[in-house]
Image (cartoon, rainbow, N blue to C red):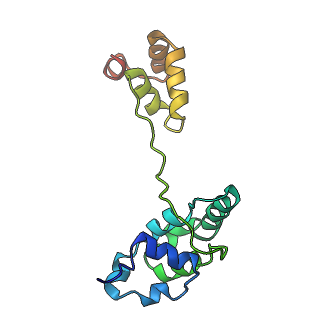
Amino acid sequence: MAIDRLSVASEMRALDAKDRDFYDSLTDEEKKKFSTFLMIRYGSSVNGIPELQQYYLQSTNLRLNKNFFDIKKAHDKLNWLAASTISPGMGNQNHQWLAAPKKAAANNKAEKFLVKMYPTMKAEDITLMANLNTAADIKKLAVDLGMTKEQIKKELG
């Protein structure tokens, strides 16, 4: 049975070993499947002492995340070479997946309206604002923002 060189475990072993030739050792078909994004997500997180976790995260941010979308597909080899500099050379680490934070869904009309009005506001702040204000306060805000009665009825009921 052949070893899957594109498995997370294989890639992270090569990353931790600073294997600069790993990308060149892949077949053309494997290179097409190689995901620098997945490599960054797994490479940035390890189990271990907090200082080691911090080191991997900061190294990944410094070396890979900064210009990732500028060079991601055209330069997978360059991304791999940069990734191979992340490890502090302390042997294989247990890398974990870091899921992107999910935005909380608004649970009522007032919250949905506030999310539209303040898209950069944190979900917990939207919930707090909706709870602190009455329905009349939210409708007054809509009027102050220049919304018509029809728009207000559609948005807030």
Is 118 located above or below residue 46 in the figure? above
Is 95 located above or below residue 106 in the figure? below
- x and y, in percent, of residue 83 in the image: 56, 75
Is the N terminus in the top left, top right, bottom left or bottom right quadrant? bottom left
* Residue at image location 65% in from the left, 77% down from the top: 89
- x and y, in percent, of residue 113 in the image: 42, 26
Is the C terminus in the top left, top right, bottom left or bottom right quadrant? top left
Viewed as shown, does residue 49 lie left or right of 106? right
* Residue at image location 45% in from the left, 40% down from the top: 103
* Residue at image location 36% in from the left, 19% down from the top: 156
* Residue at image location 58% in from the left, 59% down from the top: 47
Give whichever of 88, 101 is nearer the camera. Answer: 88
Quarter of the image where one finds residue 115? top left
Residue 75 appearing in the image: no
Quarter of the image where one finds residue 74? bottom left
- x and y, in percent, of residue 65 in the image: 57, 65
Quarter of the image where one finds residue 121? top right
Furthest residue toward front? 1
Furthest residue toward left? 1
- x and y, in percent, of residue 108 in the image: 38, 22
Residue 112 appearing in the image: yes
**What number of labels is visible?**
0
Furthest residue toward right? 51
Give whichever of 45, 82 is nearer the camera. Answer: 45
Is 88 located above or below residue 46 in the figure? below
